[in-house]
Amino acid sequence: MEEEKGLAIGVDLGGTNIKGGVVNLQGQVLKRMSSQTKAQEGPERVLDQIARLVQKLKGEGKIEGLGVGCPGLVEPTLGIVRDPPNLKGWKEVKVKGELEERLGLQVEVANDVNAAALGELHFGAGRGVKDFICLTLGTGVGGGLILDGRLFTGSRGAAGEIGHLPVNIFGPRCRCGNYGCLERYVGAEYITERAQAKLKDNPQSLLSPLNRGGRLTPKLIAEAAQRGDDLAKEVFQETGEIIGAALSGVVNLLNPELIIVGGGVAQAGELIFGPMRKALPKRAMSEDIQRVRVVPALLGKDAGLIGSASLILKP
Ligand SMILES: [Zn+2]
C-alpha cells in the first residue's frame, strides 16, 4: 500500500458506528476499520476515537488527508457540525479544526448524505451525470443535490433536506417540528406504523404474528410482500407513491437527469422503485421532466465512506 499515490482516508460517522477506510483514486476501499461510537461520552471523546481510528488506518502509509461524513447540519468551509440528530451534546463542534490539530492532516467535512451523493457522483451511479438528486431511505430520509457537476449545499450548508418536504400540511408532527414531512410517512419506523394501522382491518396478513412479537420492520414487510401478502404490498405501493409525489416536486424545481435512491429501505427493490417510477411522470409537469431516470445507488453502505474520501481526492 505504501507504493500507491493518491490515497485518502474516509470516515463515516454515525450515531452507532464510526466506519473508516483507506480509499484510492479509483474509489476502492483498500483497508477498513470500524468502532462503536461512544456518543454518550460527548464530542471530545468521539473526536479522539476518530483520530485513533485514522492513525491505525494510516499506519506507515502516506495519506493525503481525511474526509469525514457527519450527520446533521455541516458548514462545509469551516467544517463545523451543528445539532446532529443521533449525537447528543453536539450543539456546535469544529470537527475540521479539532481533527486537523489532533492529526496534522488536511481534514474536510460534509454532511453524510451529501458525502454519499459525492461518492455516487465520482464512483457510482452518478458518474458522468451533471444534475442529479441522491435520496437515502432509512430511519431518516436524506437528500443530496449535485447541480452542474457540483455538490449544492445552500447558503448555510443545509440544502437537500428532501425528507422534510411537507407532503401533507395537515399531517402528523415530524421530529423537525414541522407537520406532515415526507420522512414522517416513509422513514423506517413510519412505514412500520402505517402497516400496523392497516393490520387492524386485515388480521389475516402474514404481518400479524410478527407485529404481535413487536418485530415488524420495513425489511420484514418487504419479505412478506415478496411472498404475496396483499397488505405488505399495499404498504410498499403507498410508500413508493408518496416518495414519487415528493420527488415530482423536486423534479419540477430542479429538472435533474437522474434520481439515485439508496439506504436500507431501498433494498426492497422493485417493490418501492416500481410505484415511485410510476408516480413521477403522473405528477411532474413537462414531458422533458418526465424523462428523469430513477435508479438504485451503486456504492451501498460504502457510499458515505468513499464520498468522504473524495472530499480530499477530488477525482
Ligand atoms: Zn420534518
Image (tube, rainbow, N blue to C red):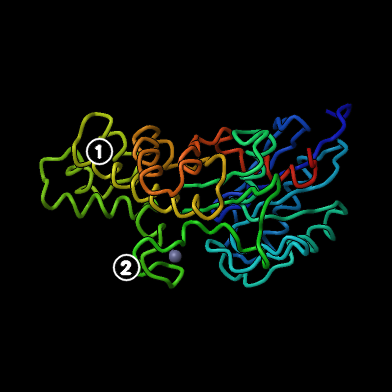
Q: What x and y, as percent, mark residue 215?
A: 29, 46
Q: What x and y, as percent, mark residue 22?
A: 74, 37
Residue type at the position of mark 2: Pro
- Which residue does the numbered mark 2 point to in the structure image? 172
Q: What x and y, as percent, mark residue 161?
A: 53, 59
Q: Residue at x 65, y 49 (%)?
A: 147
Q: How would you rate the neighbour count of disc 2 (Cα within 10 Å): few for under 14, some for 14-19, many for 20 or more?
A: some
Q: Residue at x 29, y 42 (%)?
A: 237
Q: Residue at x 34, y 64 (%)?
A: 168
Can you tell which mark lies on residue 233?
A: 1
Helix, strand or loop at label 2? It is loop
Q: Which of 106 and 132 lies nearest the eye of the viewer? A: 132
- Residue 70, quarter of picture: bottom right
Q: Which of 209 and 164 lies nearest the eye of the viewer? A: 164
Helix, strand or loop at label 1? It is helix
Give the left or right position of residue 63, taking residue 160 as reference.
Answer: right
